[in-house]
Image (spheres, grey):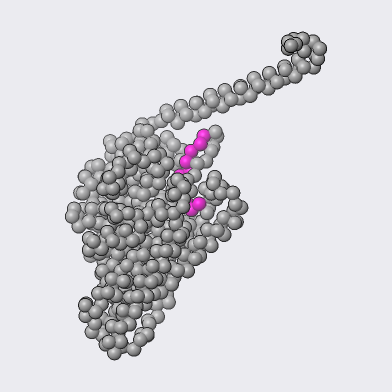
Amino acid sequence: MKSIQERIREKPWLGWVLFFVTVIVVFLIGLLASSIIERRSEALTLQTVKPLPEWEPRNEIWGENYPREYETYLKTLDTTFASKYGGSAFIDYLEKYPELVVMWAGYSFSKEYNQGRGHAHAIEDIRNILRTGGNKVKPMPATCWSCKSTDVPRVMAEKGIAEFYSGNWFDKGHDIINPIGCQDCHDPKTMNLRITRPALIEAIERQGKSLKDFSHNQMRSLVCAQCHVEYYFKEDPENYLTFPWDNGFSADAMEEYYDNLDFTDWTHSLSKTPMLKAQHPDYELFMTGTHAEQGVSCADCHMPYKTEGGVKFTDHHIQSPLNNIANSCFNCHRDETEQLIRMVYSRQDRIMELRSMLEEALAAAHIEAKTAWDNGAVQSEMYRAQELIRHAQWRWDWVAAANAAGFHSPDEALRVLGTGIQKAEQARKELALVLVKYGVSYPIQMPDISTKEKAQQYIGLDMEMLSADKEEFLKTTAVEWDKKAKERQGTLKKY
């Protein structure tokens, strides 16, 4: 067998081939080494940061250490994107769906209900909504601040969890300054994901689990589940924030949980029904869908990874995936952008069609129940219809209050809305029997609730007075809160 040297002597050009191959290999190794050194340098730069206090609530302070994440977070201030059923643009839902005013008669949501904007608007939006502003006669519980600010963990650490929840919304307003952000999800020392809201930890522990049981990818959903969930306020301890997960995540399981507790969010002013109000059960609906089954996390779609200057990081512009399809969807899907959008809208269209049918049936049921009461009906005759109304509206709200128009789990959303329609129509049949018994011709004449203004007038809301109260609140209480906030900002360094 000939040696390499002998082959080269016979074929001189072979030596040049080996020479150039060696040069190329050395060059590639050099590039790899340079990349590794650059990455290590960038990693050291990221690690050499200004130490953060345990409960630092100011997002701009975190941004000094993590400018890429902070710069993308600031994009949540952008309210220009509107999809077919959501996005970050302003939507007056009562104007768009006036039946909601009747469905929430006697409850603050009938006053004003708008599309939630980006996280950076959280403090501004909760102050400016008619459900909160100026309502000193019957103020909201202090617990309502729980998901709005990075100051919440700090105040809880200072005053205690139960003490934070107790009292009313005005009591804590001067302490709640900074909008949703870094502190809510990250450990300031390690940047690891962590849970800062005790209600989630308590719900997990009641299920016999621990946070240690969850992977990093699961944590990328659980940090969202601190707030994007259904919850209620226990009376003992006062207004204690609690997740109704003991029986499971489904609408049926939580409905059973509330019924067993005999829990009521409010009594409907027209139908006198003891009602349930879903908050925003995004996580629960998501957990019943195909994305959760396939191990996809909330952050995969709403906060996908991006690369800048050789650094891979999480995009903190938390937004609709429909405004970022290339990064959010194409990691798994291979469809064209327009085709993906059509697929999403096709599912949402079917969900919204059923949702609209259920809204019409529920508004009618509440009005028919009021007519029955007005004509002499008694509780024993109304109980079954009220139970059906309660369950039908809960199922509507479980889908409607969640973001994405049901897309987090389209099949489950359609099932829940379908059973809601069934229950609402059963309630109307029960009410028809009561109305006929009292000599009321059926179907009854329905009032004109075709606009938000007409619906609010029908249920007896004085919107001029409410708007004046809100304006006074913003001029007085909110200004005083901001004054105290500025005084306090200088003292936050001790935490």
Q: Residue furthest left?
A: 236
Q: Residue furthest front?
A: 1
**Residue sitting at x 35%, y 33%:** 189
Q: Position of residue 457 (x, y in %)?
A: 35, 76
Name the image quarter holding residue 50: top left
Q: Which residues are magenta?
A: 311-321
**Residue sitting at x 46%, y 52%:** 290
**Residue sitting at x 25%, y 42%:** 157
Q: Position of residue 384 (x, y in %)?
A: 27, 74
Q: Is residue 142 above or below residue 223?
A: below
Name the image quarter holding residue 141: bottom left
Pick the front one: 28 or 464: 28
Q: Position of residue 97 (x, y in %)?
A: 43, 70
Q: Position of residue 256 (x, y in %)?
A: 28, 61
Name the image quarter holding residue 249: bottom left
Pick the front one: 159 or 373: 373
Can residue 124 be seen at all in this image of the molecule?
no
Q: Is 313 included in the stretch rendered in magenta? A: yes
Task: Quadrant for the N terminus, please.
Answer: top right
